[in-house]
Amino acid sequence: MLVFTDGLTYARRRDIIAFAASERLPTMYGSRESVDDGGLISYGVNLTAIYRRAATYIDKILKGAKAGDLPVEQPTILELIINLKTAKGIGLAIQESFLLRADQVLE
């Protein structure tokens, strides 16, 4: 199952994680927080890094910059996070080569 990150799925991520675990569904999420909460895999942007970057924009605006003059930026770094405890819980073996590509493996 693939769970995209939006306001609704982020708010209900623990319910989605519990459902996926009860049905033994391998599930991939768009936010790291879902893996921290027990989800299997996430691949997406680092929300903390995005918020930090947003703070620099806010600082520039508060110092007088016009928001319309600031460049639009997109995330350039995506993170792959794997939760091995969840994988074992649903009976899924993850290949070593895939684990080596992960930015972080939670055990």
Image (tube, rainbow, N blue to C red):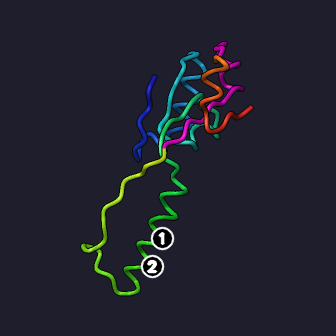
- Location of mark 2 (residue): 59
Horizontal side of 18 relative to 30 (left or right) equals right
Residue sitting at the far bottom? 64
Q: Which residues are magenta?
A: 78-93
Front-lying residue, 49 or 18: 49
Residue at image coords 35%, 59%: 73
Binning the other alpha carbons within 10 Å of mark 1 as few (below 14), some (14 to 19) or many (20 upward) gives: few
Look at label 2 and name its amino acid: Asp
Residue at image coords 56%, 16%: 23
- Location of mark 1 (residue): 55
Q: Of the numbered discs in the image, which one, if any, rests on residue 34?
A: none
Q: Is residue 88 magenta?
A: yes
The Cα atoms of the two marked residues, 2 and 1, are separated by 6 Å
Q: Are marks 2 and 1 in contact (CB under 8 Å)?
A: yes
Residue 3's x, y, as percent?
44, 32
34 lies above or below 98: below
Residue 82's x, y, as percent?
62, 31
Residue 50's x, y, as percent?
48, 58
Q: Quadrant of residue 66?
A: bottom left
Secondary-structure class at tag 1 = helix
Secondary-structure class at tag 2 = helix
